[in-house]
Image: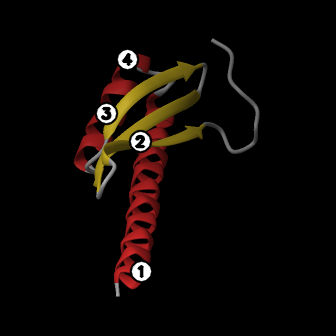
Amino acid sequence: MGLLMAIALALATVGSVRVARHRADSAADLSALAAARLALIDPEGACARAAELATSNGVELTKCEITDDVADIWTALPISLPLLGTRSVAGRSRAGPANGQHSKR
């Protein structure tokens, strides 16, 4: 019975980490798209908008870099794991022009 409980706990922990990773990545994707939209006209505002979207999706924006018209976004989501305590799951996304051509300032 103890072995079954240990296996169930391990599977639940792995599932929780996978869900958290998807949340962090999805929030990074949405934030990067929003930041890329504003990248050329308002780079500072682009990162602020990305932070707002990340927060509204329940994650923290840890880093935002705007290079020309490309936005690089890093997010983090703290999760509590049994026996391991609180850990942070990271997400990252990059968004820019679809054609691969970057505008020059």
Q: Earlier in the sequence, mark 3 or mark 2?
A: 2
Marks 1 and 4, how far apart at CA: 53 Å
- Residue 16: image location, x then y, percent: 37, 64
For the residues labelled 3 and 4, say whether their Cβ atoms are less than 8 Å apart.
no
Q: Return the residue at label 1.
A: 3
Residue 31 is tagged as 2
For label 4, the residue is 44
From the image, state whether disc 2 or disc 4 is nearer to you: 2
- Which secondary structure, mark 2? helix
Evaluate if marks 3 and 2 touch, with contact meaning CB atoms under 8 Å apart: yes
The amino acid marked with disc number 1 is Leu
Determine whether, in the image, residue 52 is placed left or right of residue 87. Answer: left
Cβ atoms under marks 2 and 4 closer than 8 Å: no
Q: Which of marks 1 and 2 is in front?
A: 1
Determine whether, in the image, residue 99 is placed left or right of residue 105: right
Q: Distance between the residues labelled 3 and 1?
A: 43 Å
- Residue at the image position 76 percent from the left and 32 percent from the top: 101
Q: Earlier in the sequence, mark 1 or mark 4?
A: 1
| SS label for mark 1 | helix
Q: Position of residue 78 (x, y in %)?
A: 30, 44
Q: How far apart are marks 3 and 4 (CA)?
A: 11 Å
What residue appears at the point 38 percent right and 39 percent down from the top-left corner?
76
Please tell me which of labels 3 and 1 falls first in the chain.
Answer: 1
Is 21 in front, or is 73?
A: 21
Tell me whether the residue at label 3 lies in contact with that at label 1, contact meaning CB atoms closer than 8 angstroms: no
Looking at the rendered structure, the secondary structure element under dot 4 is helix
Dot 3, how many residues are within 10 Å of its Cα: few (below 14), some (14-19), or many (20+)? many
